[in-house]
Each structure stands twice: as C-alpha cells, then as structure tokens.
Amino acid sequence: MTNDAGNQHGSTVYKPVNFAEKLSRINERWSPRVVAEMNDYQFKVVKIEGDFVWHDHSETDEAFLVLEGKLRIDFRDGFVTLGPGEMFVVPKGTEHKPYAAGEVKLLLIEPRGVLNTGGEDSDRTAQNDLWI
Ligand code: NI
C-alpha cells in the first residue's frame, strides 16, 4: 500500500476546538457550554445580551475572554470594557456584573464546578457542566 503525504504521519485525527463552530450551535443566551478541560479547569463558550446579576465567586478567580462584541463588567467601584481579543480576570471574592448592550460571544475559563451566578440563586443561574 502506498502512502500519500497526508497519512505518513499517522492515522489519529487531532481536531482543534473551533469557538465559532461551537457558538453557532448555541441558541440560548446566558447558558455556558464546556468546550474543553485542562486539568481541573474548564473552557466555556457563552452568548450573552443584556444585564446579569451581581455576584461573586468566593472560591476562585474567573477569566473572561471576548471573542465577539463589546462586554462591560461592572464592579462596585468601577468597570472594565472588553472588545474582541481582550480578556480580564475577575479576582476571587470580587462582586461583578457582566453587561452587554448587544450580543457578546465569550470564552470563560474557570475551575470545574463553578456556577455562573456564584453564590447568588437567580433565574440567570445556568445548569453546570453542559458540553457542546
Ligand atoms: Ni462571575
């Protein structure tokens, strides 16, 4: 059997995680979907629009990386605005409230088991550990 250039390096197919493709399969907003794990951390994509609830995460920092759109994260003493290609890490225990005037597509990075609304019980609280 002859080899071509495409299979001389083995037969295992390694696929990238494509954020745009994953996001295209999400219809709901404010419902994070896990796309990968690294050790105990999860990478989640989510679409949001509008106002979230004030909350904090008492056990962990939380990373927001904007893929599309413009995100504002409010804090009790200020705010940060993020555009595509920008990220921000919210420190553990810091109250925050994401806000998106238009639709924003985000990548969240946080330990497995972290709820989106932290210690707050809200109608925005999403089911955890849903993969796409
Ligand atoms: Ni949070």
Image: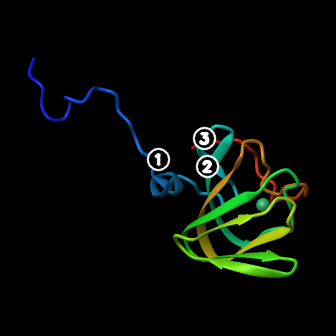
The three-letter amino acid code for the residue at tag 2 is Phe
C-alpha separation, residue under disc 3 versus residue under disc 2: 8 Å
The reply to whether residue 101 is in sight is: no
Q: How many marks?
A: 3
| Label 1: how many Cα within 10 Å (few below 14, some 14–19, many 20+) | few
Question: Disc 1 beta carbon < 8 A from ligand 1?
Answer: no
Q: Is residue 9 above or below residue 131?
A: above
**Left or right: residue 69 compared with residue 5:** right
Q: Nearer the viewer, mark 1 or mark 3?
A: 3
**Numbered mark located on residue 43 in the image:** 2
| Label 2: how many Cα within 10 Å (few below 14, some 14–19, many 20+) | some
Quarter of the picture holding the N terminus: top left
Question: Disc 2 beta carbon < 8 A from ligand 1?
Answer: no
Say which residue appears at 57% left-offset and 76% top-offset.
Answer: 83
Callout 3 touching callout 2 (CB < 8 Å)? yes
Q: Which residue reaches farthest top?
A: 1
Q: Which residue is mark 1?
A: 17
C-alpha separation, residue under disc 2 versus residue under disc 1: 10 Å
Give SS at disc 3: strand
